[in-house]
Image: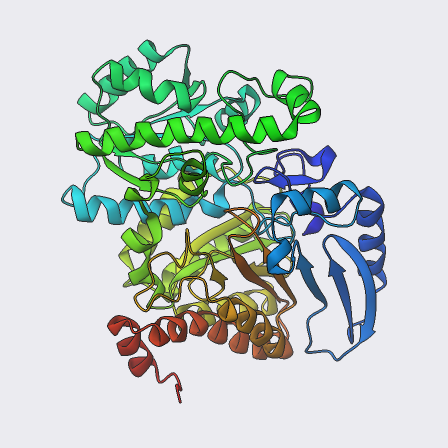
Amino acid sequence: MIQNNLDPRVAEKPDELIVYGGIGKAARNWECFDHILKALQNLSDDETLLIQSGKAVGVFKTHRDSPRVLLANSNLVPKWATWEHFNELDKKGLMMYGQMTAGSWIYIGSQGIIQGTYETFVELARQNFNDDLKNRWVLTAGLGGMGGAQPLAASFAGATSLTVEIDPERIAKRLATGYVDEEAPNLGEALKRVHHSVNDGLARSIALRGNMASVIHEIIKLGERPDVVTDQTSAHDPLIGYIPEGYTPGATGSAADLRKSDPKKYVSLSKASMAKHVEGMLMLQKSGSVVFDYGNNIRAMAQDAGCKNAFDIHGFVPLYIRPLFCEGQGPFRWVALSGDPEDIKVTDKALLELFPENKKLKTWLTKAGERIQFQGLPARICWLGYGEREKAGVAFNNLVKKGLVKAPIVIGRDHLDCGSVASPNRETEGMMDGSDAVADWPILNALLNTACGATWVSFHHGGGVGMGYSLHAGQVIVADGTTEAELRLRRVLTADPGMGIIRHVDAGYPKAIQVARDCGIQIP
């Protein structure tokens, strides 16, 4: 899986060990990568490898049901949890940025976030457009490893989309993988195509090269009003991830030169661009567009640069996702270690047979099977709730046991889940009891998944929103067809989503309280 994270079809900059999200890495450097692989190859079934910010630091005798790997990435003592201090350590080779699934070795390309984006658009449609985004258009920006999911998710939800991206290589990658349908040569042509698609009720996705800080104001001047506006640029990282207005990307572009010569100026310019971008989003919100923040921390950055009312734009979790979190719903992803796409078809069929009443799941798996191109090892993601994840895990284990798939299946998730993250500007924004910044929950999640026997468990800082803004945990478990694996799968895939339910019970959400009662979850 660490090798899959760095497959050129998967990673954004594999030669630099960067998987996605600005500088989200799979290992600290190539020497560390080699040591990690050697340690994994020599690891016994009763040993555990420890990874400290992308570096293998020790192997200890544990037991067969303990995790094979424990990872801690990018974690800093709170007073020092800043980009400035992190960058100093990074330059000295003492730390790396793990993002979420980059440093926990369960990234599967843009598909990894696509259903969460789809779920968001579907709920947005239910709340604002009578369950239907047909004849509607979405304006957004960013076609990186996360943002690249937006256009295809919008298409799945029935909408036309226009996505602005400054980096031509990223546009080319999304075109090649089918996440974007076409690229327009200029804004006028892009809007012409948008209106044609909207009028004909098509679900087309259009990419436009440009900097959204500029483009959004050009759109406003033209009197255009998108139905939906959001953003998924790498705003969480103002130095490496974001390109300021007037600068060009690339290893030798103007952005790279300024980044090296005057990083403080670079960050200041990035935040000024973000403020301008967010001001445009606020203007469109006032004109009637449905505008939401998709969790890249652009509002906080814009606020730092003087956009005082940036948080008049609300986040996608409190707006659209939290009711699902209260049910223990969240991302459930799996990878066919055989490398054979037929194994994913077998697992898709198994899920449809397992949950025949779940119409949304059927719609999703059908669309995904038709439209999503695999990047690296064949993989799939869907959203499942408490009880469903355990059933799916056991079913997959039985497929391996019976030889209906050709090799074991890796089951994991994004760190963006119902009970695994503390992120006041994203997953835990606007908690009912004001506990947005309480980080005990992701720590408990990592501890519990370790106790339950996940195959590898990770705990990271900063993923998605940047240093100082989040703490989050991940788990991955392997279905290898054995009885021992089934027991571990049952424990992990019950406890993990169960953490989401009890976290929201503790915050006072009536829906979570009812779900806990219905499911018999023990809460003292």
Which color scheme did the rendering employ for the protein? rainbow
Looking at the image, the residue that sits furthest to the bottom is 524
Q: Classify 180 as above or below 23.
A: above
Q: Classify 156 as above or below 96.
A: above
Residue at image position (41%, 51%) is 425
Q: Identify the image quadrant of residue 492.
A: bottom right
**Residue 157 appearing in the image:** no
Looking at the image, the residue that sits furthest to the left is 130
Residue at image position (65%, 21%) is 258
Residue 431 on image: x %, y %:
34, 63
Q: Identify the image quadrant of residue 303.
A: top left
Residue at image position (40%, 72%) is 503
Residue at image position (73%, 50%) is 95
| Between 157 and 139, the one nearer to me in the picture | 139
**48 relative position to 389: left or right:** right
| Between 315 and 128, the one nearer to me in the picture | 315
**420 relative position to 87: left or right:** left
Residue 405 on image: x %, y %:
58, 58
Residue 171 on image: x %, y %:
50, 23
Image quarter (top left, top right, bottom left or bottom right) of the C terminus: bottom left
Q: Classify 178 as above or below 426.
A: above
Residue 348 on image: x %, y %:
44, 54
